[in-house]
Image (cartoon, rainbow, N blue to C red):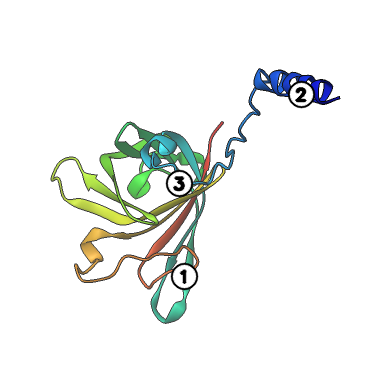
Amino acid sequence: MRVRILFGLIGLIGLTAFAPAPFMKMNRRRDRDDGDVLGRLQGTWTMTSKVRMGPNGNLMKYLPSQKLQIDKDAWQFVYDGLKGGGPKGGPKGFGRGPLYKIEIEEGQPRRFRVVRTTTRRDYMVGIVGFEGDTCKMLYKLASSRPEDEPMPTRFDDIPEGWYLMTLKREK
């Protein structure tokens, strides 16, 4: 009897020893922070909304007539003239804004800086986050930001003078 149990136990162990390991579940959430923010920003983005917090808590809405193209570390707005013309009332049709450089900084949430390529000075600073194919950027023009002003940590609380831009990735 003991011999049968022993052979049965050895057979069971032998069968499971060569069984394939179970597959690990991959984290398929696209809104996770995987460290490659610049890589996730690559491509063309359509602006779906843009707001600015004004004085006394007045939220100013802007007409989203821009697209944003990011290629490596190059940042450039693209204007659709059919929705309001190019920069500074330029000609109707497709136009491009100045070329900037984007830099991603460590921190949670991730910080970014958009730098003028001509003067090497900051143009805008802020935080960036993702929810699937949607990107949110909370930023302020660097020329109007005092150096001692703290960087926001959330997208749902827009400080005075800051812009919140929501972008949708183009397919």
Frontmost of labels 2 and 3 is: 2
Q: Pick the residue in front: 161 or 80.
A: 161
Provide the secondary structure element on which disc 2 rests.
helix
Tell me the residue that label 3 is attached to.
Answer: 33
Cβ atoms at labels 1 and 2 below 8 Å apart: no
Answer whether residue 143 is visible to the viewer in this image: yes
Q: Residue at x 35, y 69 (%)?
A: 161
> What amino acid is labelled 3 in the image?
Asp
Provide the secondary structure element on which disc 1 rests.
loop
**Between disc 2 and disc 3, whose residue precedes?**
2
Tell me the residue that label 2 is attached to.
Answer: 6
> What amino acid is labelled 2 in the image?
Leu
Percent coordinates x, y for residue 144 in the rendering: 24, 66
Crowding at mark 2 (Cα within 10 Å: few <14, some 14-19, many 20+): few
Q: Residue at x 30, y 35 (%)?
A: 74
- Indicate left or right for 157 with 139 as reference: right
> What amino acid is labelled 1 in the image?
Asp
Percent coordinates x, y for residue 48 in the rendering: 54, 49
- Say if 72 sits above or below 30 in the image: above
Frontmost of labels 3 and 1 is: 3
Tell me the residue that label 1 is attached to.
Answer: 157
Q: Residue furthest left?
A: 119
Q: Residue at x 42, y 82 (%)?
A: 56
